[in-house]
Image (spheres, rainbow, N blue to C red):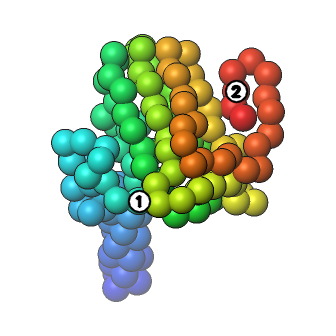
Amino acid sequence: MKTYVRFLLTASLVLATAFTISCGPSAAQQAMLALPSVEEVKDFEDKLAWLKTNAKSGESYVIEVTRNEKINDLFSSPGDFSYKGKKDITIIIKGVGGNRSISTGEAAKGLFIVGSGVTLVLDENITANGIKAAIGGRGF
């Protein structure tokens, strides 16, 4: 009986540790978020994550899209440009090396959510596909 209980406690501890480790950002994600500018971030969705963590009031950011991109996140909205307590943020998305598109995957909640105090500019060579219009600033 003691062996069985010890096994259950050990198994529970291993599962709890694994869950805790898997829920936090990986070392690679932490390093990416610590980069000094969005220009140094490589992937589109990583650039959006960098902005979510690092955007500052009164700043402008340019996101260059070098290939067609798909936002495909079931549980969050990577294209959420809402920054609580911050204002006067401009985000410019532009295609590089030709016409580029940003679209939603089947699981995505929406393409972009633009919060109060944020200006989103779809600049040269960029097309947004799969947009669902929403009322009340909830997204498009």
Q: Amino acid at mark 1?
A: Asp
Residue 81 lies, with reference to residue 14, above or below; the image says above
Residue 133 can be seen in this image: yes
| C-alpha span from label 1 to label 2 | 25 Å
Which of labels 1 and 2 is toward the front? 1
What crowding class fits label 2: few (fewer than 14 Cα within 10 Å), some (14-19), or many (20 or more)? few
- Residue 30 in the image, given as x and y percentages of width and height: 26, 53
Please state the total of marks drawn on the protein image.
2
N-terminal of the pair, mark 1 or mark 2, is 1
Picture residue at 27% right of the left edge, 63% below the top: 28
Q: Left or right of 35: which side holds 77?
A: right
- Residue 25 in the image, given as x and y percentages of width and height: 33, 55
Q: Amino acid at mark 2?
A: Arg
Q: Nearer the viewer, residue 90 or 35?
A: 90
Q: Secondary structure at mark 1?
A: loop
Q: Mark 1 and mark 2 in contact? Answer it, CB < 8 Å.
A: no
- Quadrant that contains the C terminus: top right
Q: Which residue is mark 2?
A: 138
Picture residue at 76% right of the left edge, 43% below the top: 131
Residue 87 lies, with reference to residue 60, above or below; the image says above
- Residue 110 in the image, given as x and y percentages of width and height: 70, 43
Q: Which residue is mark 1?
A: 43
What crowding class fits label 1: few (fewer than 14 Cα within 10 Å), some (14-19), or many (20 or more)? some
Q: Left or right of 47: which side holds 134?
A: right
Picture residue at 51% right of the left edge, 51% below the top: 95
Q: Nearer the viewer, residue 14 or 98?
A: 98
